[in-house]
Amino acid sequence: MAGGICALGLFTALFSASAQVTLTFNGVSPGATVILQAGAPLSIGPEGVYAGIYNQTINGVATPSFCIDVARSITAGQTYTDYNYTDLSLAPLPPAGPMGGSAAIDIEKLWAAYFPAATGNSQDAAALQVAIWLEVAANVGYPLSVNGNNLSDPVYSEAASMLNNLPNLTAQANLVGLVSPTGQNYVVPGTFVTVVPEPTTLALAGLCGLAGLILRRRK
């Protein structure tokens, strides 16, 4: 039991001690332009925004993502050094979040079901992005309209279909949040996360190893 608690503590410390990462936003592709409007407390739009796969370079690694933060904007080619990974339920940063556990699970299901098709089709990519925006907004509690929430619009209609199908989805992708106080916040695959332990974390790892050695000797 002691070894298990130590291992869990080390995992938590490793994740929370990840160093800030450098992100460069390379643009949205595939995707499409949609008209987005958010009510109070965000009070945004209506304005044209890109919806689709947000292509990032994170610590030199090409990484696909979707925006989960309609409160902040970002410019293609711009580089930030103040991003950190976090549990998806804790993202995005206020005022557009956090989304909470229910929305995080739903987004993991949407990604698992619809991301493969989104990589090769502009409408599918835009619809998945819209579905993610709507899911976050519904759980955070601000009203969000995309293309007037008009079911005759193909992007919104497909996004609504994705959300309606959530009760039938079971597979979940491994996703995490990528947050910044100055840049947009994103959902990214957990497989791209690189954790860099801080000195205190390394010390904790050493203590865990010593505790395990003492436990084995006592046995």
Image (cartoon, grey):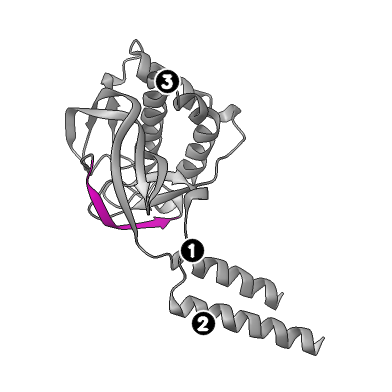
The residue at the point 43 percent across, 74 percent down is: 198
Label 1: which secondary element = helix
Type of amino acid under label 1: Phe
Q: Name, please, the residue furthest toward the right.
A: 219
Q: Earlier in the sequence, mark 2 or mark 1?
A: 1
CB under 8 Å between discs 1 and 3: no
Depth check, mark 2 against mark 1: the one in front is 2
Give the number of the mark in front: 1 or 3: 3
Secondary structure beneath label 2? helix
Task: Give the main secondary structure of the magenta stretch.
Answer: strand
Q: Identify which residue is drawn at 48% across, 50% down.
A: 192
**Magenta-colored stretch includes residue 84:** yes
Pointer 1 residue = 15
Instruction: Give the quadrant of residue 17.
Output: bottom left
**First reached walking from the N terminus: tag 1 or tag 3:** 1
Residue 11: x and y in percent read 56, 66
Left or right side of 216 for 4: left
Find the magenta span and give its range: 77-86
Labelled disc at residue 203: 2
* Element type at mark 3: loop
